[in-house]
Image: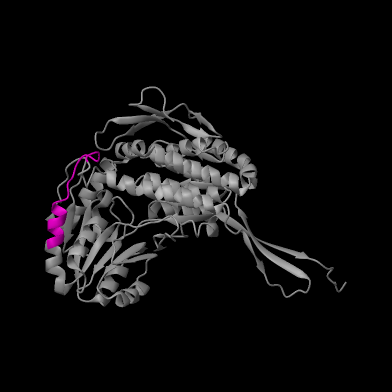
Amino acid sequence: MSTGDERLREVRHYIDGEWVASLNGRDHADNDPWTGRPLARVASGDAYDTQRAIEAAHAAFPGWAELPPDTRQLVFLRAADALEQRRREVTDLLAAETGCGAHFADVQLTFCLSLLRQSAALAYSPSGQILPSNLPGSRALAVRRPVGVVAAIAPWNAALALAGRAVAGPLALGNTVVLKPSEESPITGGTLWAELFAEAGLPAGVLNVVTHASGDAGLIAEELVTHPHVRRISFTGSTVIGRRLAELAARHLKRPVLQLSGHNPLIVLADADLDYAVSAAAYGAFVHQGEVCMCARRILVERPIADEFTARFTEKVASLRTGDPRDPATVVGPLINQWALSLVSRRVEEAVAMGARVLTGGTPQPPCYPPTVLTDVPADAEIATEETFGPVAIVAVVEDRDDALAQANATPYGLTASIFTGDTYRALDLARRLNVGIVHINDQPVNDEPQMPFGGLKDSGYGRFGLAFTAEDFTELQWVSLRDTPRPFPF
């Protein structure tokens, strides 16, 4: 919600259909990562605001879950129309709040419009099945029903899409939601969704949004996970935080869905279309300045084409424009904050000190980091082992596809991977052996559609996002039996 001077918004929590200040009276600045200037003053919530939101969601659950499917469907269709009408405004907000350029803003908007329209159909999805029973005269049903209150914890990097993904499926299935956006994206990853659904006629309390200042995320997340009314947790973020949430959730017998970090390989085999592979790798590594969990971090190139690929790829990357995300020509915009910029700089400097070579980039241009290509990176360098949210790609030579497979799997992460080759049957065999949740053959790794089973293996999390699969995690399965004749009992 915005009030007063549109140049500096006032962002409040959205609880039980009302825009409310924090109970503690505090707020904080939401800053533009390109200019450094404040975009908004945002309510600094804590556990008490979160409790209010959870109680509102709990109270609203029975009414929302019992609404007829056509009523729930209409809410999602109206929300899609509302988002479509605000497309230009949302694009500008994404640039101002998260440094998102026009292209990636369009990617997010397209995803969210499809998400809302597909979610509308979930109201009519089958809610159970008939099961065979060995007992004469007995009928058995497996019935899916909504779980209740869902805690949705969303990140800043693709704020609009990932917040939308966190709330749309659970809501469409009849649950209520408390959304905690990142402190870096309280509007595009939080209150904007409340505005859209309120305009669409979503009943009060069904979706609630609690914002917070830097350093307070843990307070709110702990309340969301431990409160007895919350039955599911949806989290997208780092493996470090995801592991903590999973441990806390396990102590309270809560089931989380976790989409966590990735260190994604892009494999280029010797029979690949070289021009296409270069273009795809540049996009897959540097879209949205590399601040996407799906971005290619390691490019593994088969030796016969390694020199030519590396030369062409480096030339392509060096030509990518860095600067203001509002400029349509910009490819690499500002990193989200100074801490992120410092982390990328430190990891590149460490790798170089250990023997890595910089082929292009490598020198910070605050608030941006230029698109950077590294080679000869030691296997134990931090940038070679940990997800680095920034515009840095590592190029490494592999001897053959088995070497590529071994290097691709030599990581605790397993989110996504890409394979470029002229032999799709060979690629399918390689995909089968990659320990990742997603493989794209002859395409780069930054892909998502609302209906797809999105998620990773190993330290990249568990559970799957995707509307066709969301009922697996956000409904309870109940066995119901009924008899049409009395059953004989032995006593």
Magenta span includes 325: yes
Q: Which portion, as a residue range, is magenta?
A: 312-327
In this rendering, the answer to whether 316 lies above or below 5 is below
Q: Is residue 321 left or right of residue 241?
A: left
Residue 482 spot, x, y in % from top left = 76, 64
The mark tally for this picture is 0
Magenta span includes 7: no
Quadrant of the image containing the C terminus:
bottom right
Q: Nearer the viewer, residue 491 or 108?
A: 108
Quadrant of the image containing the N terminus:
top left
Instruction: Check the image and name the residue furthest to the right.
Output: 491
* Res 399 → quadrant: bottom left
Asked if one can make out residue 68 in the rendered structure from this viewpoint, the answer is yes
Residue 185 spot, x, y in % from top left = 37, 40
* Res 95 → quadrant: top left
In this rendering, the answer to whether 265 lies above or below 216 is below
Instruction: Check the image and name the residue furthest to the top.
Output: 4
Q: Residue at x 37, y 46 (%)?
A: 109
Asked if one can make out residue 356 in the rendered structure from this viewpoint, the answer is no
